[in-house]
Image (cartoon, grey):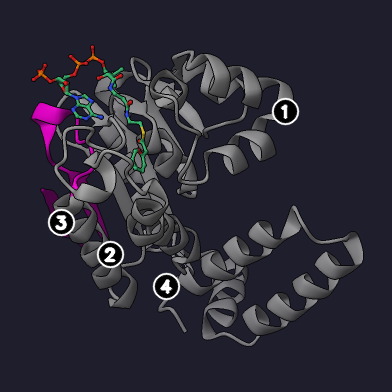
Amino acid sequence: TVLHERRDGYSILSLNRPERLNAFNEMQHRQLRAALETCGRDDDCRAIVLTGSGRGFCAGQDLSDRDPSISGERPDLGKTLETYYNPLVRMIRGMPKPVICAVNGVAAGAGANIAFACDIVLAARSAKFIQAFSKIALVPDAGGTYWLTRLLGEARAKALALTAHPLPAEDAAAWGLIWKAVDDEKLMEETVALAETFAAGPTNSYGLTKRAIHAASTNSLDEQLDLERQLQREAGMSDDYKEGVSAFLQKRAPNYRRR
Ligand code: LHQ
């Protein structure tokens, strides 16, 4: 239920339960986690693309799944989050290489919030983001309350969460929730171009940059300046930095080797 296509320098992971708009059941969770672990360990994989098969990106939790922790009379949804969604969000955030999300169609519930966990989100112009939770008497999860509040502020976060208003890709981009909306037929072309750029780029510096930006919203300026000093020190000792400067001075393309 997750396709893993290895390409030169990057991988494309596709959620693949199109008849259910790629809603998550246990199998899809397990396979996505395994694929991400493989990509994380593989030094030849320098960027990851997450997308969906068919007309949707992901409709969140499969509400027809028979897992008793979801479908019981008084199900323990906290357990589902602890077992599946929270580790997934942490894994994407902690991935020391860029994770690009190509939102090819509707992203609802946890499906939207998993997209927001990725580093760069491109969405097809026809895609919509829906905080569907309130429709079934739930609370946004998979980081939803964190992403919406951090990226949009409380006013828009609460309106989206309480109304389940389907937010079109272009509005999501204009509001700063995602990187950009692109014409449907250009989505994979643009995504692949970005992945190829990252695959030839200085992977360690990307990983350090992610760490710095993730820390920024809770750090004070002094703490952040200290963190930047520490991470820049590390980046400055890399062979990739040496190569980047030489290439610049010699007016040629750098050949980064992840060292
Ligand atoms: C689905 C689903 C779906 C099953 C479409 N499940 N079949 C975490 C912890 C534990 C438990 C609870 O949840 C969570 C996190 C969450 O994600 S909660 C939120 C769960 N997601 C939703 O509530 C979204 C439900 N889906 C929808 O509202 C619509 O399907 C959207 C707006 C996504 C798309 O609408 P349409 O484009 O009109 O498509 P459709 O509704 O006709 O769906 C196509 C098929 O996919 C359909 O099956 P059918 O057999 O009739 O063709 C749907 O039943 C199925 N499907 N989402 N989450």
Q: Amino acid at mark 1?
A: Glu
Q: Gap between marks 4 and 2, in whole Å?
A: 13 Å
- Considering every residue shown, the one lying at the far right of the view is 222
x, y percent for residue 148: 60, 34
Q: Which residue is mark 1?
A: 154
- Closer mark to the observer between disc 3 and disc 2: 3
Q: Which residue is mark 2?
A: 9
Q: Is 205 placed left or right of 5 in the picture?
A: right
Q: Gap between marks 3 and 1, in whole Å?
A: 37 Å
x, y percent for residue 54: 14, 28
Q: Which residue is mark 4?
A: 255
Q: Amino acid at mark 4?
A: Asn
Q: Which residue is mark 3?
A: 4
Q: Gap between marks 3 and 2, in whole Å?
A: 13 Å
Check the image and report above or below for 8 versus 164: below
Check the image and report above or below for 128 versus 48: above
x, y percent for residue 250: 56, 71
Q: Secondary structure at mark 4?
A: loop
Return the residue nearer the eye: 244 or 36: 36
Q: Residues within 10 Å of mark 4 (few under 14, many from 20)?
A: few
